[in-house]
Amino acid sequence: AQSVSQHNHHVILSEAASLELGCNYSYGGTVNLFWYVQYPGQHLQLLLKYFSGDPLVKGIKGFEAEFIKSKFSFNLRKPSVQWSDTAEYFCAVRGNTDKLIFGTGTRLQVFP
Amino acid sequence: DTGVSQNPRHKITKRGQNVTFRCDPISEHNRLYWYRQTLGQGPEFLTYFQNEAQLEKSRLLSDRFSAERPKGSFSTLEIQRTEQGDSAMYLCASSPLSRDDEQYFGPGTRLTVT
């Protein structure tokens, strides 16, 4: 069965700090990988996605993620966070069916 | 606004009552998905449609849950004989037919069963 693990449940950073959120998945076949973000009071929005090709994917708002197939990982990074990045971040995987399997999410708080 | 819309946004009901939620996808999106999200968890897949055909249902979707998409446009999710464990945020998403696209989520319907 497919599953997604996000080991960081709650991350607290100061502005300008660097961010890395871990995501590991369990699935033996070809996967599509996603990071979604949910800002306070808003709905889920796509940050970035990986389908194939360059394993380093760039998304909106300066976020990027790297797919490492051998580690079954798709970690999210941002070199310098801002207060406006305060949100909940969800990693998701899509295997051979169209449903998304989400991780439990990481709550990021950025203080000025 | 051309995004996914869901109604109602909030629903409070007593245990044992039936509730129905509606989702209007982005126009011309062939696929429509329902997910459920509880506090501290990520969204969990419930079911999805391609046009009017229901293609997959999760084991989470007990017999008390039914979803329809009668004309391949909007969808409804009905929960019969609600239980307190049904309290959650119910999310709808839609996507085009191509697998090379993401799912676009609506704002959700928050259900509270008292």
Image: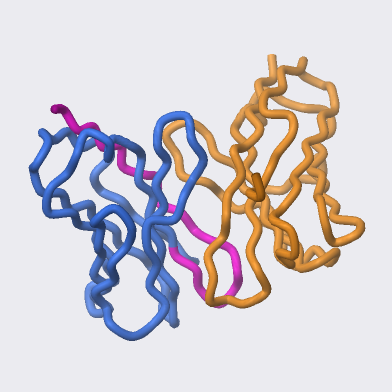
- Residue A36 is left or right of residue B114, and the answer is left
Q: What is the residue that sits farthest to the front in this orientation?
A: B1
Question: Residue A21: x and y, percent?
Answer: 22, 52
Q: Nearer the viewer, residue B89 or B23?
A: B23
- Residue at 29% x, 71% y is A57
Is A20 rendered above or below residue B18? below
Is B95 rendered above or below residue A86? below
Range drawn in magenta:
A93-112
Which quadrant of the figure contains the C terminus of chain B? top right
- Residue A11 is left or right of residue B88, and the answer is left
Which lettered chain is shown in blue?
A
- Residue at 32% x, 62% y is A59
Q: What is the residue that sits farthest to the right in this orientation?
A: B70
- Residue A71 is left or right of residue A26, and the answer is left
Which lettered chain is shown in orange?
B
- Residue at 65% x, 58% y is B94
Which quadrant of the figure contains the N terminus of chain B? top right
Magenta stretch containing residue B64, yes or no?
no
Is B48 rendered above or below residue B99? above
The image quadrant of residue B55 is bottom right
Q: Nearer the viewer, residue A69 or B110?
A: B110
Question: Residue A110: x and y, percent?
Answer: 19, 33
Question: Residue B104: x and y, percent?
Answer: 57, 55
Q: What is the residue that sits farthest to the bottom in this orientation?
A: A53
Magenta stretch containing residue A104, yes or no?
yes
Is B24 rendered above or below residue A100? above
